[in-house]
Image (cartoon, rainbow, N blue to C red):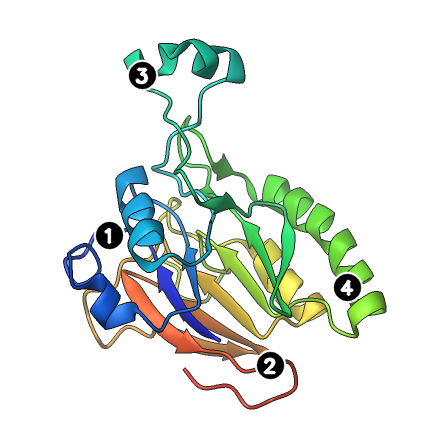
Amino acid sequence: MKILAISDEVVSRVYDEGIAKRFGDVDLVLSCGDLPRYYLEFIVTMLNVPLYYVSGNHDKKPPPRSLDHYGIHEHLTHVHRPPGGCINLDGRVVDRDGLLIAGLEGSMRYKNGPYQYTQAEMSWKAGRLGARMLANRLLKGRALDILITHSPPFGIHDAKDRCHTGFRALVSFMETWRPRYLIHGHSHVHDRRNPTATQYCDTMVLNAHPYRVLEIAGPGEPTRD
């Protein structure tokens, strides 16, 4: 399966009329957050493939259903509609053509705002997701193939400032559930000397900023990035 992973930055190579020519063989799109709704909707429309996403620290909360029903949200600046045709994967696990994919949104809490968590709060979220990993392991013989997150794990592709510090819970998650990939955003890479692919235990940690294409074979088969 060929996957287009995206995060944090709108880029012309993806956001233009040539997208179908460049990425027409992609089977799936994974968004790791902090991308505008119009960008995700353009991609899912042009490629006509499933798009799963998690939210980042700069994303806005969707409106309550009552406001959405009356269209009031269009006049509010602190909320937005979720991207049409896209699937929010936060706290969920899906089986897409045999590929087990899960998601965890958000960054470290550094101010008041949506999709920001303390280390303890993310540990709780990851723990809830872990209960579903156990079911996968029992029923399917493996817990997970891909975890998509906004923030990186602690000590891998993260930074020293509070906003860009990674989550310790993601390290524990990899040690316990051994996904084949953890794909994240949040860490902008403009210097090619900064690593964007790091192996940790059985997991390849990949930074998706601003986009990358990877090819994943079926469970137990060789993979190629």
Q: Residues within 10 Å of mark 1 (few under 14, many from 20)?
A: some
Report helix, strand or loop for mark 1.
loop
Frontmost of labels 4 and 1 is 4
Q: Earlier in the sequence, mark 3 or mark 2?
A: 3
Circle 2 is placed at which residue position? 218
Q: Is residue 141 shown above or below 7?
A: below
Percent x, y for residue 156?
A: 45, 67
Given the current orientation, which residue lies at the most extreme bottom position?
A: 222
Tell me whether the residue at label 3 lies in contact with that at label 1, contact meaning CB atoms closer than 8 angstroms. Answer: no
The residue indicated by pointer 3 is 74
Sequence-wise, which precedes: disc 2 or disc 4?
4
Out of 53 and 157, give the one closest to the viewer. Answer: 53
Q: Position of residue 140 (x, y in %)?
A: 78, 70
- Tell me the CA gap for discs 4 and 3: 40 Å
Distance CA(mark 1)–CA(mark 2): 30 Å
Which circle marks residue 132 in the picture? none
Q: Residue at x 21, y 51 (%)?
A: 10
Circle on res. 136: 4
Sequence-wise, the earlier of marks 4 and 1 is 1
Q: Tag on residue 9? A: 1
Q: State the residue in front, 48 or 90.
A: 48
* CA gap, disc 3 and disc 1: 24 Å
136 relative position to 189: left or right: right
> Residue 180: horizontal and vertical position, in percent?
58, 75
Q: Three-letter amino acid code at disc 1?
A: Glu
Q: Amino acid at mark 3?
A: Glu
